[in-house]
Image (cartoon, grey):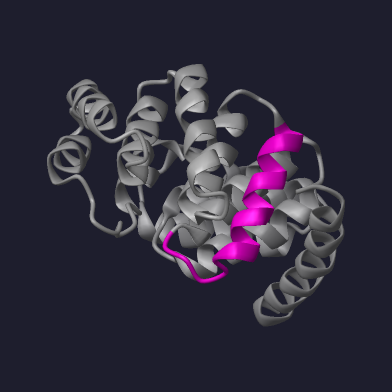
Amino acid sequence: MFGMRFFLFVLIFSLFSSVVFSQTDTPDETRQSLIPTIRSSPPDALAEYRRGNFERSVQICRDEIAVNANNLDSYVVICWSLISLGRYEEALRYARTARSIARFDPRVTQILGEIFFYQGNNTEALQYFQEYANQSPAGPRISTVYYFIGEIYIRTGKFRHADIALSTAVHWTPTNANWWTRLAFARENAGELTEAVVAYERAIALNPQHPDARRGLDRVRQTLANR
């Protein structure tokens, strides 16, 4: 069942993406757990970012950019830090500059998607996330990208699409209880109650105290019992 979902999503996504690109050119804890390896990283800024010292990381990156305006890694780290601080417009300015330096760097593509996601711009976010999946289909941020795609589909009421995207996210990162809970929620709203139970139970197995998973499982079991 899951294998078919994953295959269908990859097939549909590939066809859709080819049309999109012919026409146009997680939360902090999720981001922290999936920090990709960067080439020639600015170690001080990245170290501060990993410690959660986002303001310090921003300042270090600004100093580096002042010395070398084309230091792509500094733009990447400053964007991660600004997103963590909720300063999305500022992050967007740096991300657009980074995009002009390296048009096809998948880190920058994903950053733009995340910024637009948090700003509530679903259309732009989805475009960049799809572009990332084309650029780096097995990249270090791929599970996060599919998670965000799933959340966009939940926002827009496309619950079966969300099911496929979130199933792909947990395929790549099967230990994230929050993502299993969101997958279960998508399935519940799509009317796939038996599959929703499976996902809620998986979330609870990973985190027995997860309140949303427990409430969701009770809700779905009650619905099934009343049928």
Residue under the point 83% across and 54% down: 20
On screen, residue 201 above or below 214: below
Residue 181 x, y percent position in the rendering: 54, 49
Closer to the camera in the image, 87 or 166? 87
The residue under the point 32% across, 45% down is: 73
Residue 198 visible (yes or no): no
Bounds of the magenta segment: 122-140
- Give 50 or 3, whichever is nearer the viewer: 50
* 129 on left or right of 43: right
Expressed as whole percent of the image width and height from the top left, the position of residue 179 reads 51, 51
- Left or right, 191 with reference to 2: right
**Residue in the foreground of this view, choosing between 226 and 57:** 57
Name the spot of residue 30 as percent of width and height, x first. Answer: 39, 45
Q: Quadrant of the N terminus?
A: bottom right
- Compared to residue 63, the image places residue 12 above or below, namely below
Q: How many marks?
A: 0
